[in-house]
Image (cartoon, helix red, strand yellow):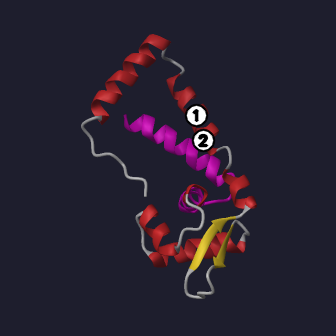
Amino acid sequence: MRWVVWAQRKAGEDWIRARELSFEQAFVLGCLIRSPGAIQRDIAQMTHTTAASVSGLLQGLERRGLVERRTEGGNERSKRVYATPAGIELVAGLDTAMAAADEAILAPLDQSERATLHALLTKITAELPQPTRS
């Protein structure tokens, strides 16, 4: 199972690195695409990190024109963060790339074996703590 996870992660990291992003930057962009207008504290919660870490990530993404911070409601202290069209375009296709990686990993299995594997993994994961999406 570790090799499968390694192969999936490597495929994702290779795809992300080809776009000159870190895993964390890509994750933050993904969070902002799913939750546009998040505040820094929300992003820290979604990424399970600190507001200070998020600040540094956002600064790098902002310099590249991939995110923008907007003051809303006249409150200078409260800025909402949005992925820019360039940021959205940069990470578009990650799901497709990961599906292709999954297909390559499962290539040695026929449909019956894939169904059996899926059933077994569903049984195993039913007992595991579920990931949260904030």
Looking at the image, residue 122 sits to the left or right of residue 3; the answer is left
Residue lying furthest front in this view?
73
Q: Helix, strand or loop at disc 1?
A: helix
Q: Is residue 13 magenta?
A: yes
Residue drawn at x 70%, y 65% as measured from the top left: 66
Residue type of the residue flagged with mark 1: Ala
> Is 62 rendered above or below residue 91?
below
Q: Quick check: marks 2 and 1 in contact, CB under 8 Å?
A: yes
Residue drawn at x 54%, y 58% as measured from the top left: 31
> Is 29 rendered above or below residue 3?
below
Mark 1 — residue?
99
> Spatial distance from mark 2 to mark 1, Cα to Cα?
6 Å
* Numbered range of the magenta stretch: 1-30
Q: Helix, strand or loop at disc 2?
A: helix
> Is 91 rendered above or below residue 111?
below
Q: Quick one: label 1, few (<14), some, or many (20+) residues within 10 Å? A: few
Mark 2 — residue?
95
Q: Is residue 39 magenta?
A: no
Give the number of callouts: 2
Horizontal and vertical percent position of residue 101: 57, 34
- Magenta region, main secondary structure: helix
Assign the N terminus to one quadrant of the image. Answer: top left
- Examine the rendering and report whether any part of residue 133 can be seen: yes
